[in-house]
Image (cartoon, coloured by chain):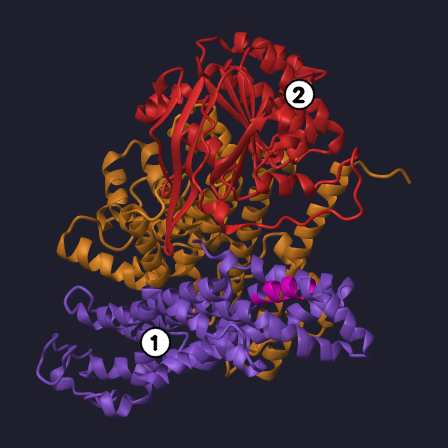
Chain colours: A purple, B orange, C red
């Protein structure tokens, strides 16, 4: 008991004794203010659960998600052994949803890595270099921004061929420009600050300044933006899956599952309804989490 | 040379930047279509064509020329409105698009009207009564809108309002008895049926469009109400609002005559963006509702690897995006004295 | 009789960390005079001005034994009744015309609106009246200014327009909340003179809120000194330099004076007791 209070005291100390102490203390205070946001905690809870489900899928799934049983197709909700029923090939919907969480997380994680990093590269180079490099790079960014995102992603996938990796690539290609804009704006303010001038006088090169001093400061605004974008990424991936351009059958991708269930929507509604609920829950969780993170990390742009 | 008048310079700059954006857009579609992975010749002649047929088509497409030259040919084609012929039905892609586009326009326009009519008042009230139950409801509406897959919500809508309740017409623009009953003038069936004076067709068409349009309207409402709220909050804390109150003005007039006037400009941009998003959101909605618009057209073409049709559709949607941007910039200048 | 009688005015803002008292039991009266309220930022002087007009928005809470305008308690009026007090009987000029004028309305429309809210007048009458008012605040070429937008005006012009707009319904009391703080020093005096002339001509009461002790001493008849939401001292403006309260003395000593040059100005030392002491009544 007294042990925990002293930890709290150490973390909340006004006079940090070392750099790490200050960092941990800042983190802890951020966490405290985040924790007081019930909705954001709710979102975080859902996402943690989702990750656990994805990790433990083989243990949790009551059935093999790929095994067909044509004798027991389109079984309704609450059927014995199939809580969420079965699909048109007699596969257990719950098990497919559980395995599908892996695909969703995989796509989101990849896009959330590729797009911000690409945007960060373009944005910082553009902002730091200035001049015609800046003009050209920002023009390109504007052109991508002017494009309808889903339609562009469709065209990319059409050219590249359907599949999860190509869907990831297509979504990333349409998702990077806003990050580039943010990173450029941050770079412009940082670049003109005195401490950058000081580092430059000490002989630091452009590469060192960008990677060591500019990137770390861009991270927090990018993280907020990424979290807020996650829901959009999930919806885009599900949309591509629904159109048959993402994960290919028999893969239990949620969007593709809705597409399969669509044919039976009027008579066997649960087949399409359940994966939709899964998508809704996860993207809602990301939205709630994003709102909460924005309040903690970026108080000036929060709505409150 | 005499210096140019500022407004001429401004116009030239704007035109230049539009031209560059359009060129960029065409360049991307060009890259996707010609350079990326699929052999465009194979796509036309098929796998089993003889070498001589292959070579003939290769030359016909101009693929022996340098890429830059090919790009200029491509631009020239697009300027003339030539997107090539569809591989699927051998008709010019531009004709197909002209035929399907009004259906999408009708749907998206109705959707954005729903979004504006409901979204703006909701956003204003949420800002004025910040923290009240109505603000909370507005927040939930927006959150749900941001989190729900549009195609799934469409399916659920069909299931409930068509399948179970039977309140609305099912998929398609009109019931089968009314197909091609009224002559196509604008291509928008609600307007065409009114022109023709055919009330039955109008009612039937309305019962079909009401669900997908409300659905799209819901998404634009979510966005518009959120943006309206945050713009309004910013204005309500401004000092000129206090001035208006000091004058002895009623709260209603303070809100609508003073604060709201100041967010019109920002709202225009939001509405233009929202409209553009609806054109895009209609891709998935149209499939659910078997709506014969540009979204259905692009996806059908896509699944049959009809690249000309896909890229033609992409270019058209992209151009509309750019036009909407220009349009909102122009309106900006009308409504904001500081931007003139 | 007094124009305005404020008794035991409190302004509170509940927050997560408890209630914050912005104004704590302030009492004063205003006749046909120029009353200055001086204090540093956060002393509650602006809040006092706004509370008189009942402009404190929720979650802020205003309580007072009375805020009487010629014997009628404003605290007992409904919001609708308050609207005929605002502008018409009590008006307010705020700090920065850049923010206090609506940027997307022409100046003419804003002045005409202020007039027509309280007077049944045709548009042309209101227009003529507005021109007259603009001339009264020494605006040259008022027709052009009527058509212009606020961003086309300089700060000094903007503030004169603001004064014209606030005085056009002919109120009895004008609250001027730091009316010259955002202006260039060169035009401050001009704006003050115009305001002073109009207030005198019309026999109005003026509450002049400022952080500038010398300005207030120069310009007002009587001065209230506020600290931490309370009135700590009241004195006649011409006797300000004989003030007794240590806070007022501290403020005075921290300002350079031409007639008594010093090598080193004093730094204001604050005594926590000042904040806890009861408010001095400014009622006459």
| Dot 2: chain letter | C
Residue A294 in the figure: left or right of residue A97: right
Q: Is residue C234 magenta?
A: no
Q: Position of residue B255 (x, y in %)?
A: 42, 33
Distance from Cα at disc 2 to Cα at disc 1? 60 Å
Residue C39 sits above or below residue B175 on the image: above
- From this viewpoint, is residue A126 visible? yes
| Quadrant of image for the C terminus of chain B | top right
| Quadrant of image for the N terminus of chain B | top right
Between C66 and C281, the one nearer to me in the picture: C281
Q: Is residue A185 magenta?
A: yes
Between A172 and A9, the one nearer to me in the picture: A9
Residue C283: which quarter of the image? top left
Decide: few, some or many residues near mark 2? Use Cα within 10 Å; few <14, some 14-19, many ≥20. Answer: many
Q: Which residues are magenta?
A: A179-188
Label 2 sits on a secondary structure element that is helix
- Which residue is the site of mark 1? A47
**Residue C145 has which mark?**
2
Q: Position of residue C146 (x, y in %)?
A: 63, 19
């Amino acid at each position: 008991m007294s042990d925990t209070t002293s930890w709290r005291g150490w973390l909340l100390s006004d006079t940090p004794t070392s750099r790490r102490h200050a960092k941990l203390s800042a983190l802890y205070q951020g966490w405290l203010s985040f924790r007081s946001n019930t909705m954001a905690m709710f979102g975080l809870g859902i996402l943690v659960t989702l990750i656990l489900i994805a990790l433990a899928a083989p243990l949790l799934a009551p059935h093999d998600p790929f095994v067909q049983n044509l004798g027991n197709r389109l079984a309704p909700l609450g059927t014995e052994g199939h809580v969420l029923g079965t699909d048109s090939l007699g596969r257990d919907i719950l098990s497919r949803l559980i395995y599908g969480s892996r695909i969703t997380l995989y796509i989101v994680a990849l896009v959330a890595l590729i797009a911000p990093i690409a945007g960060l590269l373009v944005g910082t180079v553009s902002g730091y270099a200035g001049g015609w490099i800046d003009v050209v790079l920002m023009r390109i960014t504007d052109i991508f921004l002017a494009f309808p995102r889903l339609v562009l992603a469709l065209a990319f996938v059409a050219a590249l061929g359907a599949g999860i990796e190509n869907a990831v690539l297509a979504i990333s290609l349409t998702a990077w420009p806003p990050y580039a804009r943010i990173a450029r704006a941050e770079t412009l303010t940082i670049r003109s600050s005195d401490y950058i001038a000081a580092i430059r006088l000490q002989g630091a090169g452009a590469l060192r300044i960008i990677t060591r001093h500019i990137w770390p400061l861009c991270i927090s605004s990018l993280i907020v933006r990424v979290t807020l974008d996650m829901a959009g990424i999930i919806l885009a991936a599900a949309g591509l899956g629904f159109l048959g351009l993402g994960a290919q059958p028999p893969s239990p991708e949620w969007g593709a599952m809705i597409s399969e269930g669509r044919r039976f929507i009027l008579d066997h509604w649960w087949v399409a309804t359940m994966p939709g609920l899964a998508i809704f829950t996860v993207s809602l969780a990301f939205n709630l989490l994003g709102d909460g993170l924005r309040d903690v990390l970026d108080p000036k742009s929060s709505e409150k | 040379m005499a210096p140019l008048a500022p407004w001429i310079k401004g116009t030239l700059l704007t035109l230049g930047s539009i031209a560059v954006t359009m060129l960029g857009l065409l360049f991307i579609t060009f890259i996707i279509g010609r350079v990326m992975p699929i052999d465009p010749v194979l796509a036309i002649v098929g796998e089993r064509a003889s070498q001589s047929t292959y070579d003939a088509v290769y030359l016909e497409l101009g693929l022996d020329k340098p890429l830059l030259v090919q790009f200029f040919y491509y631009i020239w084609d697009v300027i003339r409105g030539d997107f090539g012929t569809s591989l699927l039905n051998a008709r010019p892609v531009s004709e197909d698009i002209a035929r399907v586009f009004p259906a999408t326009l009708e749907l998206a326009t109705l959707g954005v009207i729903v979004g504006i009519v409901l979204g703006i008042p909701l956003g204003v009230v949420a800002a004025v009564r910040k923290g009240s139950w109505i603000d909370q409801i507005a927040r939930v509406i927006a959150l749900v809108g941001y989190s729900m897959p549009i195609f799934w919500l469409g399916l659920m809508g069909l299931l409930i309002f068509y399948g179970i309740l039977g309140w609305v017409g099912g998929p398609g623009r009109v019931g089968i008895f009314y197909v091609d009953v009224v002559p196509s003038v604008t291509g928008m069936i609600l307007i065409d049926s009114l022109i023709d004076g055919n009330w039955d067709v109008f009612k039937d068409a309305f019962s079909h469009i009401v669900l997908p349009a409300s659905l799209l309207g819901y998404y634009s409402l979510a966005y518009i109400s959120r943006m309206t709220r945050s713009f309004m909050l910013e204005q309500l804390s401004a000092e000129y609002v206090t001035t208006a109150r000091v004058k002895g003005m009623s709260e209603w007039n303070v809100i609508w005559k003073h604060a709201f006037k100041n967010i019109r400009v920002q709202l225009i941009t939001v509405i233009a963006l929202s409209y553009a998003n609806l054109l895009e959101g209609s891709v998935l909605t149209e499939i659910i509702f078997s709506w014969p618009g540009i979204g259905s057209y692009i996806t059908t073409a896509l699944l049959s690897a009809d690249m000309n049709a896909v890229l033609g559709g992409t270019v058209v949607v992209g151009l509309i995006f750019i036009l909407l941007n220009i349009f909102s910039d122009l309106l900006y200048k009308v409504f904001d004295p500081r931007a003139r | 009789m007094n124009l305005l009688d404020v008794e035991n005015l409190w302004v509170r803002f509940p927050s997560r960390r408890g209630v914050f008292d912005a104004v704590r039991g302030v009492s004063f009266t205003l006749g046909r005079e120029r009353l200055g309220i001086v204090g540093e930022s956060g002393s509650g002087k602006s809040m006092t001005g706004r509370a008189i007009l009942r402009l404190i928005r929720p979650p802020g809470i205003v309580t007072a034994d009375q805020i009487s305008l010629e014997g009628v308690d404003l605290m007992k009026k409904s919001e609708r009744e308050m609207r005929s007090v605002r502008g018409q009987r009590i008006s307010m000029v705020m700090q920065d015309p850049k923010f206090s004028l609506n940027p997307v309305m022409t100046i003419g429309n804003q002045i005409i609106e202020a007039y027509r809210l309280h007077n049944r007048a045709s548009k042309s009458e209101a227009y003529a009246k507005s021109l007259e008012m603009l001339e009264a605040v020494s605006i040259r070429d008022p027709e052009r200014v009527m058509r212009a937008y606020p961003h086309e005006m300089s700060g000094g012009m903007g503030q004169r327009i603001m004064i014209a707009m606030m005085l056009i319904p002919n109120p009895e009391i004008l609250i001027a909340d730091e009316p010259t703080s955002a202006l260039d020093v060169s035009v401050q005096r001009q704006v003050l003179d115009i305001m002073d002339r109009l207030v005198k001509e019309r026999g109005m009461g003026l509450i002049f809120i400022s952080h500038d002790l010398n300005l207030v001493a120069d310009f007002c008849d009587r001065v209230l000194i506020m600290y931490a939401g309370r009135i700590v001292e009241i004195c006649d403006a011409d006797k300000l330099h004989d003030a007794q309260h240590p806070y007022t003395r501290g403020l005075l000593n921290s300002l350079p004076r031409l007639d008594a040059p010093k090598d080193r100005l004093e730094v204001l030392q604050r005594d926590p007791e000042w904040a806890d002491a009861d408010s001095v009544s400014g009622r006459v």
